[in-house]
Image (spheres, rainbow, N blue to C red):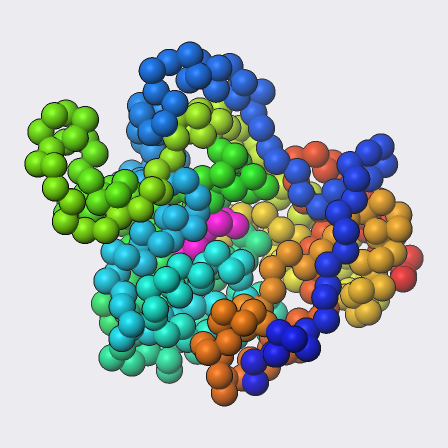
Amino acid sequence: MATEPDNYEPTEMPLLKEEDGTLVLFHPFIAPEASSEVAATLGSRWIGEGPKVKLFEKKFSEMEGAGFPAIATGAGTDALHIAYKLCGLDADSEVIAPLFTCTATNIPLLHERVKIRFVDVMSDSLNMDVSQIRGMINKKTKAIVCVHYGGLPCGLDELSAIEKEYGIPVIQDGAHSLGLRWRGLPMSHWSRYTMYSFQAIKHITTGDGGMLIINDTDAGLIEKAKRLRWFGIEREKKLGGVWGNDIKEIGYKYQMTDVAASIGLAALPHVNSVLQHRRNLLSIYEQRLKGVDGVRFFSGAVTGEQGYEHGAWLCTILAEKRKDLQKMLYDRGIESNQVHYRNDRYSIFRESAVDDEYPNMDRIQDNYLVLPLHNKIIAEDVHRICDLISKGW
């Protein structure tokens, strides 16, 4: 049964102050060139959506989007909502979606009044169990949403096969997954819609922002996405003086600004080094925590021959007496937390989980813990954390 939110014990601890000796859980990456990029934009005609947004879309598509059309937005959630609108969802629709994810994945579905069908996590990761999906599909199923938790790929072969077999669009929430490669190809190769996030603590940031990659040659679909991003207006025609001065569909104010795009453009040349740094740290965690009593590394294999390149956004472990471990680390100046939670703990999703059971999530919901992994963390910090964990708690 779904967990009752009122009975769910709080799991978070206060944020640590960032000072000498403390290791915080997250820290934004800002490229050294960002200040000059932003200053140039602030001195230009365009600080809202303008040429920098177009350039960021082009360069990001070349890097992560396999050349497919890219739509920059004010947040990753905006990009997801546009994708959901493009799928034509309504109150008679069902959408198969992960139980365990940031609420940003599923909240836009509530705005479309769809019935959400939650999928339990896998027993060896916090990714959704894609083996359950075929048995959940019915004539009302209009979309499937997946998340690659922490940067670990989630069943892309099966999801791609389902999309082709049933004609049901798959939307990838790639908020954790910049740089993830499956069989040598970027995520956007494997489904019709892929969202990337540039929220403050992601691999790279634009302050806040998102990108929707559309793996489709339908020009009408691309143009509709652009209209939905800006009130339902054909913005380029309006700026060119040839707009018919009519709005025929309800849109949103979901565009990215040139100020934000400037921060993103400065970060793009650093993506490979950022990813390599995070993968190196995650690999140390993997090796150091192997065999430690009471701990299980839960972020998927980072090294070896797995057929993928890990996105390395989070380091997650399962720990016995997780709260005791979390407090021990906190008392020694190391921040950790659970970060995301099963969505059925929240009242807004309660109707979506009536009479459903999620045994894998039930077993691990109190035991997973996220450890620091970001650009300010170095190898010595990871060894320090692992040394403390190895000594017990």
Task: Kindly indicate the quadrant of the structure image that contains residue 157.
Answer: bottom left
Per the image, is 129 magenta?
no
Q: Is residue 244 above or below residue 221?
A: above
Q: Is residue 22 above or below residue 4?
A: above
x and y, in percent, of residue 261 in the image: 42, 29
Q: Quadrant of the C terminus?
A: bottom right
Q: Nearer the viewer, residue 108 or 137?
A: 108
> Number of labelled discs?
0
Q: Is residue 29 above or below residue 150?
A: above
The residue under the point 78% across, 36% down is 18
x and y, in percent, of residue 332 in the image: 88, 47
The residue under the point 71% across, 56% down is 337
- Which residue, as the protein is rendered here, is positioned at the far bottom? 355
Would you say the magenta stretch is mainly helix, strand or loop?
A: loop
Q: Quadrant of the N terminus?
A: bottom right
x and y, in percent, of residue 280 in the image: 66, 41
On the rendered structure, is 335 left or right of 268? right
**Is residue 280 among what the camera can see?**
no
Q: Which residues are magenta?
A: 172-177
Q: Nearer the viewer, residue 284 or 162?
A: 162
Per the image, is 173 magenta?
yes
Q: Is residue 19 above or below residue 110?
A: above
**Is residue 86 among what the camera can see?**
yes
x and y, in percent, of residue 288 in the image: 78, 52
The residue under the point 90% across, 61% down is 392
The residue under the point 35% across, 38% down is 255
Q: Nearer the viewer, residue 287 or 35?
A: 35
On the rendered structure, is 362 left or right of 292? left
